[in-house]
Each structure stands twice: as structure tokens, then as C-alpha cells.
Image (cartoon, rainbow, N blue to C red):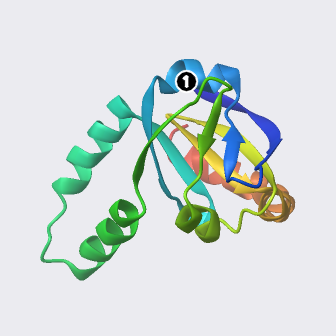
Amino acid sequence: MFMGEYNHTVDSKGRLIIPAKFREILGEKFIITKGLDNCLFVYPMEEWTNLEQKLKSLPFTRKDARAFMRFFFSGATECEIDKQGRVVLPTNLREHAKICKDVVVIGVSTRVEIWSKELWDKYSSNAEISYEEIAEKMVELGI
């Protein structure tokens, strides 16, 4: 399981150090794709395969299903970590997440998210206000 929050920087070649705890779980190859909320989603291959199977079962006749699949799969790229624990973030993904230099890498159960520090700070400060409301809704869902 992925959890925790780590601050890192992207170098001039677009490389990012992946936290050691996350590297162990991600394995040799993994998928990075456009995420929601202007971040990047990172999946271990097994989790990506599971998600791919679920998405393939969506009805392609639905416009919203086609749009989501295009968004999700068009940005996906298979990545590997180098000997220094870094991964190259492709330019299109950095642009999607508005990543220039400072980033926050967070664990979210079955995936890792990569955020520009600026967007993460903004998201976190806005989310803090509504955590109590979110918690109440989770109770309604039986969590």
C-alpha cells in the first residue's frame, strides 16, 4: 500500500526521484498517466492491468466513457527507475500537472500521485476546510 507525502524536485532533464518506499512497491516497470485534479497517477503494472480491465468493460457507446478512456490512456506511458532512483517524467505529463521544479509525491493506497507543490498546497488548504464534510459523507457510505 502507498502512503505518505514526500517533497522532491524535478531536474532540468525532467527526472524525479521516487521515494524508496514507493520504488519497492512499484517494481521495475510501472505506468504514469494523466490524473484528475491536475496531478499524475502512477500505477504498479498489476494495478494498471486491473484498472485497464475495468475500463475496457465500460460501454464504448457512451460518450463520457470514450472521453475518459481517451484522456486516461492517451497520457499513459510505461516507465522505469534508473540506478539513482529517478524516473523521467515526459514533457506532456509535466505540462498536464503544471510541474516545473518543486513537486509533492503522495501515496494514495493503490497508486502514487505526483503534484506540483504549488497545486498540492492549494488543493490541501482548500480540502482542509471540507474534511469534516467529507468525513460525514464517508459515514453515510458505511466507512
Q: Residues within 10 Å of mark 1 (few under 14, many from 20)?
A: few
Q: Going 25% across and 74% down the picture, which residue do you hit?
A: 66
**In terms of image quadrants, where is residue 70?**
bottom left
Q: Is 140 left, or right, of 68 in this rendering? A: right
**In terms of image quadrants, where is residue 97?**
bottom right
Q: Going 58% across and 29% down the picture, which residue do you hit?
A: 82
Q: Going 33% across and 30% down the picture, which residue do you hit?
A: 46
The answer to whether 126 is drawn above or below residue 7 in the figure is: below
Q: Quadrant of the C terminus?
A: top right
The answer to whether 70 is drawn above or below residue 120 in the figure is: below
Q: Is 109 left, or right, of 57 in this rendering? A: right
Q: Quadrant of the N terminus?
A: top right
- Disc tally is 1
| Identity, as a three-letter code, of the amino acid under mark 1 | Met
Secondary structure state at the residue bearing disc 1: loop
Q: Give 129 or 73, whichever is nearer the viewer.
A: 73
The answer to whether 36 is drawn above or below residue 45 in the figure is: below
**In terms of image quadrants, where is residue 127?**
bottom right
Q: Give 70 or 133, whichever is nearer the viewer.
A: 70
Q: Give 15 or 102, whichever is nearer the viewer.
A: 15
Residue 117 position, x and y percent, is 82, 56
Residue 69 position, x and y percent, is 30, 66
> Most extreme residue toward the bottom, as rendered?
63
Residue 99 position, x and y percent, is 72, 62
Q: Is 99 left, or right, of 38 in this rendering? A: right
- Give the residue pinned by disc 1: 1
